[in-house]
Image (cartoon, helix red, strand yellow):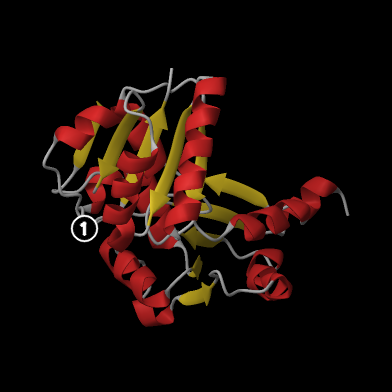
Amino acid sequence: MKSEERAAVLGILYLIPTPLGDTPLDAVLPEETRRIAAQLTTFVVEHAKTARAFLKQVGANLPIQQLSLLELNEHTRTEQLEAVIQPLLTGVDVGLLSEAGCPAVADPGADLINLAHRHGITVKPLVGPSSILLAIMGSGLVGQRFAFHGYLPAKPEARASALKALEKRSEQDDATQIFIETPYRNRAMFETILAACRGDTWLSLGCGLTTGGELVATHRVEEWRKRAFEIERSPCVFLIHRR
């Protein structure tokens, strides 16, 4: 079978971003993204309950209970991916949903996308909100060179060491260093940054992006130390940079 004939019988894997918070869909998702999501019948999701709520908002063409939702999360084993990808191999278009923001960015799904490429399946990323890009856009820090590190260690000493290493890397590469934290540990992360980082290091926070409680603020660490600031328990992107 010719490669173009094989591609014709395979489904398309659509990467569908979702809102970062309780935000109206039309405020953060283009009409085309919503249209494609509404017409699909099979989805790969991290949590079925969250996915159903999103698809109800989108206005799925089929009743929610008739949609096929295949779960893929941090507990999914590599050998289970072959079962998840089967609909695509039989010609069914599939949507990969994130819990919030863009699929496979600080989110499960990259292994499935890699497997899709190995099978010659077309992968189509759709437009939607990315907390990482929104945070770097709003920070005023270097956007030409930056690195995203996901979650830093949870234990205080290891977290402080990781921050000092990122601070050093930022200065060496003249690059913004970006990381995230579980919302209930935001305060601990913020306090460790103020204690571990040098006073002239820049720190930017992008919290609750695109939501009614959005905060985007950038100051040097020494300035943050002087402020009576209480960080919220909302999704937050942390960015540091040293010149």
Q: Is residue 44 left or right of residue 186?
A: right
Residue 81 in view here: yes
Extreme-top residue of the structure? 243
- How packed is label 1: few (under 14 Cα within 10 Å), some, or many (20 or more)? few
Q: Amino acid at mark 1?
A: Asp
> Residue 205 versus residue 166: which sits nearer the camera?
166
Asked if 125 appears above or below 58 in the picture, the reply is: above
Please state the total of marks drawn on the protein image: 1
Q: Is residue 24 left or right of residue 153?
A: left
Q: Where does the image place residue 173, in percent across and percent down from the top left? A: 56, 22
Q: Which residue is mark 1?
A: 22
Label 1: element kind: loop
> Residue 176 versus residue 1: which sits nearer the camera?
176
Extreme-left residue of the structure? 228
Q: Where does the image place residue 187, in percent across and percent down from the top left? A: 26, 54
- Which residue is depicted at the point 30% across and 33% down? 204
- Which residue is depicted at the point 29% across and 48% down? 191
